[in-house]
Image: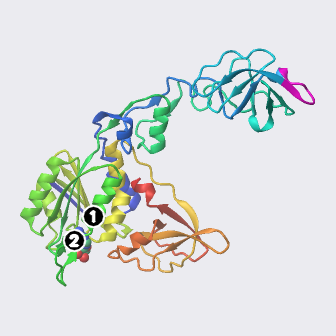
Amino acid sequence: MTSCDTTAMLAYDDALRQLTGGISPIGKKTDLELRAALGAVLAETIESRIDVPGCAMSSMDGYAVNTADLSATGTTTLPLSQRIPAGTAAADLRPGSAARIFTGAPVPAGADAVIMQEQVLAADGSISFEVHPQSGSNIRPAGNDIKSGTRILTEGCRLRAQDIGLAASVGLKTLSVFEPIRVGIFFTGDELVEPGEQLAAHQIYDSNRYTLHGLLTAMGCEVVDLGLVGDSLDETKAAMQLAATRADLVVTSGGVSVGEEDYVRIAIEQLGELRLWRIGIKPGKPLAYGQIDATAFMGLPGNPVSVFATFCLFVCPVIRILQGRGWQKPLPLPLIADFDWPKPDSRREFLRARLTSADDGQTRVQVYPNQDSGVLTSTVWADGFVEIAENQTVAAGDVVNYLPFAQFFG
Ligand code: AMP
Ligand code: MG
């Protein structure tokens, strides 16, 4: 058991660097059928073994011709020599003829353009037209989408619908993915009551459990939910030990301040290694992290907005690294402020914000009027954070950095 109770305020970037520096991927792999792999993290880099499409294909319903057969001026008339629906193999184009062809059908050898059917007069087994298409018109060459040997998906990407579609387009039936990481959660506070139960005036409903469950599920984690734990050292230690044996990461809310009823801090000190930080951010100043045997631990503050914000800022990076995705800080979008923020703060602020379309047609960003860390409504109203540097003020019209929520927990 070791302890490191750092009372000085740690800068956000330093905290993030220290935290992520000590985490490595879990790395357990499994093979999944394509559809089941949606949302999983790819454990292999994939190169295509085929050209897509495999041969030149028509991109129109029309007529395949050889542009050398067309008259330089005036009308060209050509006999029809074959009909090529999609899904059939084509014979070579007979010289001096045209082939009826459909979208997705192979262009016959000897043809170098497809004329749209709307530009052609067809009668008595032949066609006439005035147009003179360029060689290659309305033809998708072999490998137009993907050339054999090209890297199409990279290890560590979280598979989206379009990634799964792309894997299917090169004929893959299964993908090697990382198994979901397991995150154990529990929530401390004798004032908490589960939704659906009777509430006394001195109690509040436990919302953090549901916020965290949703965030973890959205990130593709398997959640081991131990529910509410009372404010006692024994209960907290028992929950911590159980969570640590069943999960790759334990995340809790509440009980990390230095109050007499804050047992998470003491429990982790007794069971493993603790670092307790006061981080220079708002919301979410206290953050505990540490290790119980091989399991990483993160103790979030109790305030519901602090839970949401510290999850985005600190838990997401840790989860991404454990998942094998790696972490890069989201790129901020510079946007014009539609608000004033006249009071500077020595901590970096992450205001709950959303985009608005101003009368001049420009996209601007607004902030929720009540930024109290107990006002969960602000996270529902918002789509992202405005990040305000330490000791900065903002006047409407200034450019500020906007960070969409989806960039963190997608
Ligand atoms: P703590 O960090 O335990 O001192 O809690 C800080 C504040 O967050 C207190 O007002 C708690 O009542 C509140 N809080 C703690 N846990 C939860 C929870 N699971 N759901 C909603 N509010 C909570
Ligand atoms: Mg508490």
Kindly tell me whether residue 73 is visible in this rendering: yes
Is residue 74 part of the magenta span, yes or no? yes
Locate residue 63, reporting x and y percent: 74, 28
Q: Which of 4 and 191 lies nearest the eye of the viewer?
A: 191
Residue beneath disc 1: 210
Q: Is residue 378 above or below residue 32?
A: below
Residue 316 x %, y %: 35, 54
- Mark 2 within 8 Å of ligand 1, using the beta carbon: no
Q: Is residue 45 above or below residue 293?
A: above
* Kind of residue sitting beneath label 1: Tyr
| x 18%, y 83%: residue | 202
Residue farthest toward the front in the current orientation of the protein: 124
Q: How is the image coloured?
A: rainbow
Q: Amino acid at mark 2?
A: Pro
- In the image, 55 versus 146, the foreground residue is 55
Question: From which residue to which does the magenta span run?
Answer: 69-77
- Element under disc 1: helix
The mark found on residue 195 in the picture is: 2
Q: CA distance from mark 2 to mark 1?
A: 10 Å
Q: Find the residue positioned furthest to the bottom.
A: 201
| Magenta-drawn stretch, dominant element (helix, strand or loop) | loop
Q: Residues within 10 Å of mark 1 (few under 14, many from 20)?
A: few
Give me the residue at 33% from left, 58% from top.
215
The quarter of the displayed image where residue 258 is located: bottom left
Residue 362 in which image quadrant: bottom right
In the rendered structure, the answer to whether residue 140 lies left or right of residue 387 reads right
Q: Position of residue 310 (x, y in %)?
A: 34, 62
